Image (spheres, grey):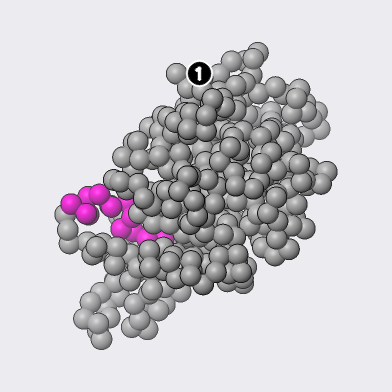
C-alpha cells in the first residue's frame, strides 16, 4: 500500500556507484528503484523518506530536489557497522496542492508508526513538521517535539507556513502534543516577547550558546523527543551556506552531528526531519555534504540503541529514592545499568491522565539533577512536568 505514495530513486541521477575499496552505506540500503521495486517494510527498521515539498516556505523557495542532493553524499559514506539494514522508500509524490502533500505525508507517517518503523525524513521545508505531527495524532500517540532551530516558528500569518507551524500544532484540538522543546534559538531572531511566550506555554527553550557550552546537556532533551525537527539555518553560514536565511552564528556542523547521534540513540525518537536545505544557495554541495554527515550519525545512533527506556522495563534499573525533608516529599530516579543514563519519575494522582501520559512520566535527566535532589533541591525539570500533570 505504501508504494503508491512514492516515486522511485534514480541511482544514476544521485550519482551512486559501489566503491570496490569501501563498503558504503548505499550498498546496504534497500532502495526503492524502478528495477528493484518497493522494499519490504520490516517492523523495527529504519526508513529514509524524501519529501520534495517547498510550497509552505515563507522565504526559502527552491528546496525541491534537496533529498536527492543529500542522498548523493549519504550513500557514498562508509557503513557505520556491518550487517545493518536501512530502507529507502523514495521520494513522496508531490500533491496537486500543499494540502494534498500534507495528507499523504500524514498517512505515510501513521502507517510507518503502526509498524514501529523509525523515519529519517529529508525535506523540504520545516512546515512539514505539521503533517508529521498529524501522523502521530492519527495513531493516537501523545508525543514530544524537539526542534533544532534558531527561531521558534510560533507566530505570524493564519495560513500555515514554515515560520508558524508550531502555532498550528498547538492549536489542534484534541491536542496530542505533550511538550515542545527548542534547542539553539538565537535571541536576536526571536525577541523577548516570544521567549516569554514559550515560558508561558510551559515549553522548553535553550539558547545556542547555552547548549554549545555543554553539548551533553542536550542529550536528555533529545532522548525525551518522539519527533526531532531540524532547520538547517540553526547551523552557522560558514558550515551550511545552503539556506536563504543563513546566520554567521549557530551550531557548527560537527555539533549538529553530535545532536543527530543523540537523537538516533534515543529509544523514544521515531522520526527525524532535516529541512530548509536550499541547493540554490549552496557552495559545491557543502551543506548537502554536511547534512549527509548528520544523517549518517543519526543512522549510526539508531543501530547503537541500547533498549534502555525504563518505561518498558523498570525492574532492570537502579532505583534511587531521595527524601527531601524540607519539602516533605521524595523524588524517584532511575539509572540504566546498560548506559548509565538517568530518568526522574513525575507523580500523577489522576488515573485518566496517568494512563494518557504514561510514556512521559519518566523524564530523561542528567546526573546533575540527582545531585541537586541530594542537596535538598527539587530540579526545575521535575517542577515543569509536575505542573503539566496538575493542569
Q: Residue at x 68, y 33 (%)?
A: 65
Q: Is residue 351 magenta?
A: no
The residue that mark 1 highlights is 4
Q: Could you say where residue 370 lies in the image, as x and y percent from the top left?
A: 39, 73
- 79 or 143, which lies in front? 143
Q: Assign a secondary structure to mark 1.
A: helix
Q: Residue at x 66, y 34 (%)?
A: 64
The residue segment tinted magenta is 352-365
Q: Residue at x 42, y 77 (%)?
A: 371
* Picture layout, residue 361 above or below residue 214: above
* Picture layout, residue 219 above or below residue 111: below
Residue lying at the far bottom in this picture: please name it. Answer: 326
Considering the image in quadrants, where does the N terminus appear? top left
Q: Quadrant of residue 110?
A: top left
- 338 or 266, which lies in front? 266
Q: Could you say where residue 71 lies in the image, as x and y percent from the top left?
A: 69, 34
Amino acid at each position: 500500500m505504501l508504494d503508491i505514495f512514492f516515486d522511485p530513486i534514480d541511482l544514476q541521477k544521485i550519482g551512486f556507484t559501489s566503491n570496490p575499496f569501501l563498503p558504503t552505506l548505499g550498498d546496504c540500503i534497500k532502495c526503492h528503484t524502478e528495477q528493484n521495486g518497493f522494499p519490504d517494510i520490516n517492523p523495527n527498521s529504519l526508513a529514509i523518506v524524501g519529501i520534495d515539498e517547498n510550497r509552505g516556505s515563507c522565504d526559502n523557495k527552491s528546496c525541491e530536489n534537496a533529498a536527492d542532493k543529500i542522498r548523493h553524499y549519504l550513500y557514498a559514506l562508509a557503513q557505520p557497522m556491518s550487517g545493518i539494514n536501512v530502507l529507502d522508500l523514495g521520494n513522496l509524490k508531490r500533491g496537486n496542492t500543499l494540502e494534498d502533500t500534507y495528507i499523504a505525508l500524514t498517512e505515510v507517517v501513521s502507517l510507518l508508526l503502526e509498524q514501529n518503523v523509525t523515519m529519517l525524513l529529508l525535506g523540504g521545508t520545516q512546515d512539514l513538521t505539521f503533517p508529521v505531527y498529524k501522523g502521530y495524532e492519527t495513531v493516537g500517540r501523545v508525543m514530544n517535539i524537539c526542534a533544532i532551530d534558531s527561531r521558534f516558528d510560533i507566530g505570524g500569518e493564519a495560513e500555515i507556513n514554515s515560520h508558524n507551524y508550531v502555532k498550528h500544532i498547538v492549536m489542534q484540538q484534541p491536542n496530542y502534543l505533550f511538550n515542545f522543546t527548542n534547542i539553539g534559538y538565537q535571541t536576536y531572531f526571536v525577541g523577548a516577547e516570544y521567549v516569554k511566550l514559550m515560558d508561558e506555554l510551559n515549553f522548553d527553550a535553550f539558547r545556542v550558546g547555552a547548549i554549545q557550552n555543554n553539548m551533553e546537556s542536550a542529550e536528555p532533551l533529545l532522548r525525551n523527543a518522539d519527533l526531532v525537527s531540524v532547520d538547517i539555518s540553526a547551523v552557522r553560514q560558514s558550515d551550511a551556506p545552503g539556506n536563504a536565511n543563513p546566520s554567521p552564528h549557530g551550531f557548527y556542523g560537527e555539533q549538529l552531528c553530535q545532536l543527530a547521534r543523540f537523537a538516533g540513540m534515543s529509544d523514544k525518537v521515531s522520526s527525524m526531519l532535516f529541512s530548509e536545505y536550499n541547493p540554490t544557495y549552496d557552495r559545491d554541495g557543502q551543506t548537502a555534504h554536511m547534512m549527509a554527515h548528520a544523517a549518517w550519525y543519526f543512522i549510526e545512533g539508531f543501530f547503537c540503541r541500547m533498549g534502555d527506556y525504563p518505561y518498558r522495563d523498570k525492574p532492570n534499573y537502579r532505583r534511587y529514592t531521595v527524601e527531601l525533608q524540607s519539602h516533605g516529599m521524595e523524588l524517584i530516579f532511575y539509572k540504566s545499568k546498560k548506559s548509565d543514563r538517568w530518568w526522574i519519575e513525575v507523580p500523577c494522582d489522576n488515573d485518566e491522565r496517568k494512563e494518557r501520559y504514561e510514556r512521559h512520566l519518566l523524564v530523561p535527566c542528567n546526573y546533575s539533577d540527582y545531585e541537586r535532589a541530594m542537596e535538598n533541591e527539587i530540579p526545575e525539570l521535575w517542577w515543569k512536568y509536575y505542573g503539566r500533570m496538575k493542569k
